[in-house]
Amino acid sequence: MDSNSVSPMPELAPIAEFDKSPPSPPNEEVPMDDLPPPPATISQAEGKKIKVQRSRSYESDEHERGACEWCEYALVITLATILLIGVSALTIFWTFFYREGYGWADDIPEKQFNLHPTLMVAGFITFSGFSVLLYRICRCFRRIYVKLLHAIFHALAFPCIVIGFLAVLDFHNKKGINNFYSLHSWVGFVAMGLFGLQYAVGFFSFLLLLICNKGTANFRASLVPIHAAFGILTFVLGVCACLTGLTEKALFTLGAERYSGLPDEGVIINAIGVAIIAILAVVMYIVSRDKFKADSREMRASVDL
């Protein structure tokens, strides 16, 4: 073939020049300005964060509370409930079986006096004991419901203490016995005064002031430890008044000589006193155990609901 007839080769496209700079190291930080904005708003993110934290706190609390702690909690609460109900039942049994029951008549003033030990044990021990333990028993309830139950038990104890006091006061006047001369009467009078003061302060500060919840929150929070301390003191004084009253009743009714022989009625009276002491020990043990308290995070979460 003729060299002149060969068609010329087409020119190739120029090869693209690549960037020959070395790649950026993997640990190089990327500027925050180059990142896209977060998909969620701040309020939504905070709400989700709070929910996650609450759910995690509940899970951690469940892991922290082992089987031994739950068994201890169930045992002492059950024991306290049996003792609180049993001591009132035993007092009623003693009154009906040995003291001929109850009454409010001029011809049988002794039956009127029988209202005094029964109602004082019911008010100062049973109802007040349950009222003290409600913040340990009702751990899963919302705090406002526990407060209402606390007020209800105190409302049940209040008429018991008042009627019991009026019964013995009227009995002394009918029999011509002096009032407020014994250690039992002094301790009981102080216990009644503290109980009435506690009831008035608690009703005003923790129920009426809830109408203005935010405005009185700091005041009510500062009053809680004072109210709790005086509540325990009132319960202890009520126990002392009941114990001294039982001893006084046994000595006056049975006589020192017969009481020293330990008759059946004396055994019942002593059993009531031992049950009251056991109640005081169990209640103080439950109150002193921080593990039996409702978790503060759960309390705050229940209030916010």
Image (spheres, helix red, strand yellow):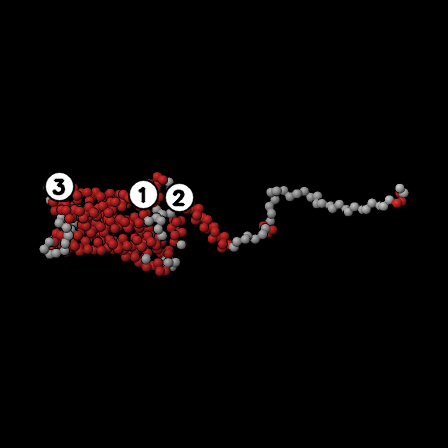
Please tell me whether mark 2 sits on a helix, a strand or a loop. Answer: helix
Q: Mark 3 points at which residue?
A: 263
Spatial CA distance of label 1 from label 3 is: 36 Å
For residue 277, side relative to residue 216 (left or right): left
For residue 14, side relative to residue 251 (left or right): right
Foreground of the two, 102 or 109: 102
Q: Which residue is drawn at 63% across and 42% down?
A: 25
Q: Name the residue under label 1.
A: 74
Q: What residue type is labelled 2?
A: Glu
Q: Which mark sits nearer the N-terminus, 1 or 2? A: 2
Please tell me whether mark 3 sits on a helix, a strand or a loop. Answer: loop
Q: In which quarter of the image is the N terminus?
A: top right
Q: Name the residue under label 2.
A: 62
**Number of residues whose C-alpha sits closer than 10 Å to that of mark 1, classed few (under 14), some (14–19) or many (20 or more):** few
Q: Which mark sits nearer the N-terminus, 3 or 2? A: 2
For residue 271, side relative to residue 41 (left or right): left
